[in-house]
Image (tube, helix red, strand yellow):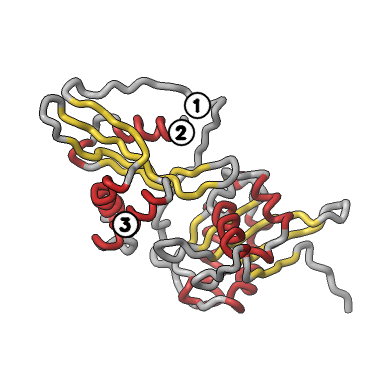
Amino acid sequence: MSSVPSPFQVNVYGSSLQVPENVLDAMRNNQPSANCTLPILLKSRSFESSGKTPPNQQVWVVCSSKNSMGDVVVELVIAITEGYIDSYPAFFFSAIPPHLLAREFVQPRMEKMIQALFIVLPVRRVYAVYGPDLLAKAFAWCWTSLTGVGNYSTKPYYAAKLSFCTRQTFKTRLLPLREDLTAEIRPADPNDIMEVAQCCYGFASDSDPYNLTEQGAIREAEFLVHQGQIWIHRVTRKGTGQSAIASIVAFTRISETNGTITKVYTNPNWRRLGCAERLVRQVCEL
């Protein structure tokens, strides 16, 4: 009998400090695509390097192969990590652009990665997956086949499109505000926390089962404000002094050269005034 060696290998790391440097290099070389994994990995390494222990188990599953020169090439990464508010979904990183991924390439690798994940992680910890369509579907199919846990729905719960701009591609656009209003765009400060919390609550209100309680929204707002990760667009009615936060923008996944906007919300009372676009544009010019 003869056997054919696998063209790839899968490794599991229970600490961010154990994750090899070539994995970080692969993510750093494609920071927009690594926006869900690299910032968390860097933050975790800094946290663990100071002698602290993450509050919950974090797992990094890495699939790699060797090129014709014998060098190890990172292909796929699954990250099971923790956030300040709650546990994150399973996040993916692909060193290969998503539009070049093929099912024949992904499926066998995903099967081995999930088998490795199943050994070290409780089934209940995987409550959602987030990433490129092909990877998310492959994960869901393999996870259900292995664990018997079916999908919540036949349709994706949430669909998003990743886009990015640079200082070279960003284009300025003037967005005048209604004449009876004035605008103030700036980072949120501690005096804004309760209004920011109302926006966080509103953002999550139609995201069942990921809704926030009022206290949960306050906790999130306090964290975002103290971390300097949220900007506000405040509007004031001329001649009255009455003001309110119309829109918020949060950017919570930040690496060396990349920042990701993860939350945009406009109070229903102030919609159709261009507040969200005005605020997003200001944040992108940072």
Query: Residue 256: horizontal and vertical position, in percent?
Result: 60, 44
Q: Amino acid at mark 3?
A: Ser
Q: Position of residue 73 (x, y in %)?
A: 76, 54
Vertical side of 60 occupied by 174: above or below = above
Q: Point out which mark residue 170 bears.
A: 1
Q: Quadrant of residue 282?
A: top left
Q: What is the distance, in whole Å, between disc 2 and disc 1 at their CAs?
A: 8 Å
What amino acid is found at the position of numbered circle 2 in the picture? Cys
Compute the Cα span from label 2 to label 3: 26 Å
Q: Which percent across, then down, holds residue 255?
A: 57, 47
Question: Would you say 285 lies left or right of 206 here?
Answer: right
Amino acid carrying label 1: it is Phe
Q: Nearer the viewer, mark 2 or mark 3?
A: 2
Q: Which mark is residue 207?
A: 3
The earlier-in-sequence mark between 2 and 1 is 1
Task: Determine the secondary structure under disc 3.
Answer: loop
SS at mark 2 in the image:
helix
Q: CA distance from mark 1 to mark 3?
A: 31 Å
